[in-house]
Amino acid sequence: MRIGQAKPADCPGIRMGDPRGRPAHLQTLWNYALATSLDAKSTQTPLGGQEDREALSRFAAWAFRALGGTAHRANSGVEAMLPAPRLDVRRSGEVDDRPTWLRLDAPVRLGIGLDTDGEFAEPSQGHGDSIPADQTITPRSPQVEWLIDRLHLLGAAVHSAPTRQPASAGEIAERLLPTYRVDGGRIRLSGCSLEDRAFFRIFARSPAGTRPQRFVEWTIDADGRRVDDQVAAPLGLDEIGPVQGRPSEVAASALADLSHLAEQGATAACGPLETIAATLVWCKWASGRLRIEFPQACAEIRFSDWAATLEAPAFVCPETGRKTHHIGVTDDGRIAAGEEIATCQETSRRTLRRELSQCSASGLLALAELLATCPITERPVLKRLLATCGVCGEQVSPAAIRDGQCLACRSLAVALPSDPRIARVLGEFPALDGWRKWRISETANRYVLVGSSLLKRLLVVLDRMTLEPRRVATGGRLNRAWTTIPPEQWALELGRQESA
Ligand SMILES: [Zn+2]
């Protein structure tokens, strides 16, 4: 039996001794359990009837398995077989020491009936010498008495384990690994320990002659608290059988303390009871690491939980915080949630989705550095798709240009001298005051102004912020073509206030 090292403080169950076989800490735990038991509140109290019937059927199934037989629980009962010969042949001196009611070649069906008051129905009387395949048991029927006697030969507390729980690192890997999707890499179990932790269970019944007859299964954890079905069922505690491998040793005094605790709790909830059998149920606690490996990077996911209920923990993306079971890597070696990784359609680089933008002209997803914001539409556009306006020289989205002119240059509006933009420009460039009429438009970065006189036009493109000239050109009133004026003549043409 493998013994784990990690011992998280917040999990119930009774821990095994240390790997060298000493029953370490057990006495301390037992004492702690005793000290806290009086405060422990039972969350569910068995109601009798159906629940008692369930407890008796679980007891019978477990008892058969513990005695070397097979059992499975069917409708309100148990189907069980005990092969012959069994147990210690020398003790009985017989080849087959099974009671006559078990000497069948087929499984015997032990039914548990309830009468109209919810009490255990008494078995119907057998007839003839044949062994009935269908038998009825009650907490005090001969079959149950025989099972109790045989169990006592096994010792003070039988060691058990859930019949279904992952018991090896391989099974843990099988359970966890298929949950993950790793793009371009792999995930593997890089460490796993399975530590046995016990719960303690008693089966108890009302003293002889008491009515109604109760049959109670009572399970406690290391703190002496009752473990109800909501906790027990997912751990597999409702179907237990012999423990595999060599169980750890538990001190007799510890067992006595546990028995006392469990019986005290059961009695407080269900009235006077006598314990007929007890078992330590060892459940596997799994802890370990999953390693995610890519050629250029690796990461780990840790897990720690009951093996029976262990679920693949989500990977927390270090880049975005997203919790996921889909993991990928960027081309520059950053491990991230697969959903957060995308490919730049311009460069084919895999990177974080947040580092990509969509081109408003082409719809392509590309690295932000490959895009610019169109000064007209103010939306991102791939730089390689930008078109230059033949008038203002702005680089704009193809959607904002027609016949070589951007939207701003195509939609100049008449501006009166009182327009604050015109006033600002004329204040800066007094020589422009000679033009009769102005039309103006603007982009995110520039003013486009066209002044006109009787025969001529003047185009002035200025930086919106600084009013720095970007282009100056002249043209006639009758044609659309502009003749660019070289920058060295701009001062003369515009008559800038300060520099003049
Ligand atoms: Zn333009």
Image: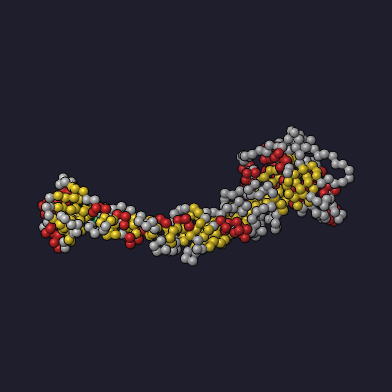
Q: Position of residue 53 (x, y in %)?
A: 73, 41
Depicted 489 relative to depicted 150: above or below? below
In the rendered structure, the answer to whether residue 463 lies left or right of residue 333 reads left
Please provide percent x and percent y for residue 369.
35, 60
Query: Residue 125 at x, y = what percent?
Result: 84, 39
Q: Between residues 178 and 310, which one lies in front from this camera angle? A: 178
Residue at 15%, 55% in the rendered image: 477
| Display colour scheme | secondary structure
Rendered residue at 77%/43% (across/down): 111
Front residue of this view, candidates 247 and 477: 477
Q: How many marks?
A: 0
- In depth, the one of 375 and 171 nearer the eye is 375
Residue extending furthest top?
117
Q: Position of residue 149 (x, y in %)?
A: 80, 47
Asked if residue 59 can be seen in this view, the reply is no
Residue at 21% from the left image edge and 48% from the top image edge: 413
